[in-house]
Image (spheres, rainbow, N blue to C red):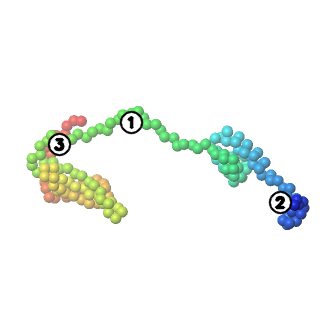
């Protein structure tokens, strides 16, 4: 069963609105289509312009430009960050090696060769750094130092600590030319 046909005047009375509002057609879709073509022209000339620069170019409100661009899915071309290609010299460059001065050496007495090492230990969300000086002959730690900072002073204090307990090794190793 179909509803009886009513005139627009009676419908307007029932809805408590003026009769002319029933004939109203939105002007915005037409304006938006016109603005879309203007935005596309600006984007053709300036591919990376966003809604702010387009609004400045067209002398309109940036919110309106953004709304129309979003409505029609218009997006500027994104500019990628440029990365310099690596130089050919850097690709094939080998770091200079430090020669091993004790390789092939026979260590038969204490206090002939000392080595140092450092490490870090996690402690309540921070790190504590530990530097040690070790005698290669008996693998005994002869000096150590702990610090909250990892710097040259830490290893220097570890060396001074080792010198308190043992005399310095004799400097009988000749440094070879590299």
Q: Which quarter of the picture shows residue 130?
A: bottom left
Residue for badge 2? 1
User: For the residue carrying disc 1, how many other residues have a C-alpha within 10 Å: few (<14), some (14-19), or many (20+)?
Assistant: few
Label located before the other in sequence (1 or 3): 1
For residue 161, the mark is none
| Residue 13 left/right relative to 90 | right
Residue found 80% across the figure and 53% down from its top: 26
User: Where is residue 139 shown, x and y percent of the image?
Assistant: 16, 52
Q: Please tell me which of labels 2 and 3 falls first in the chain.
A: 2
Identify the residue at the far front of this view. 1
Looking at the image, residue 104 sits to the left or right of residue 62; the answer is left
* Residue that mark 3 sits on: 102
Of circles 2 and 1, which is in front?
Answer: 2
Residue at (88% x, 59% y) in the render: 5
* Cα–Cα gap, marks 2 and 1: 85 Å
As rendered, which of 65 and 159 lies closer to the eye? 65
Quadrant containing the N terminus in the rendered view: bottom right
Please determine whether, in this image, residue 162 is positioned above or below residue 15.
Answer: above
- Please give left or right for residue 175 compared with residue 69 in the image: left
What kind of element bears circle 2?
loop
Cα separation, mark 1 vs mark 3, equals: 31 Å
Mark 1 highlights which residue? 90
């Amino acid at each position: 069963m179909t509803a009886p046909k009513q005139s627009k005047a009676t419908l307007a009375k029932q809805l408590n609105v003026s009769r002319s509002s029933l004939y109203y057609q939105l002007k915005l879709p037409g304006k938006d289509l016109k603005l879309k073509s203007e935005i596309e022209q600006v984007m053709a000339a300036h591919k990376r312009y966003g809604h702010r620069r387009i609004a400045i170019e067209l002398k309109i409100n940036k919110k309106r430009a953004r709304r129309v661009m979003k409505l029609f899915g218009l997006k500027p071309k994104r500019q990628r960050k440029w990365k310099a290609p690596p130089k050919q010299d850097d690709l094939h460059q080998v770091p200079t090696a430090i020669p091993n001065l004790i390789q092939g050496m026979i260590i038969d007495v204490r206090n002939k060769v000392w080595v140092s090492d450092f490490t870090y230990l996690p402690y309540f969300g921070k790190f504590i750094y530990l530097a040690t000086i070790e005698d290669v002959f008996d693998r005994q730690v002869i000096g150590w130092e702990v610090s909250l900072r990892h710097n040259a002073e830490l290893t220097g204090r570890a060396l001074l600590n080792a010198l308190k307990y043992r005399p310095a090794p004799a400097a009988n190793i000749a440094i070879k030319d590299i």
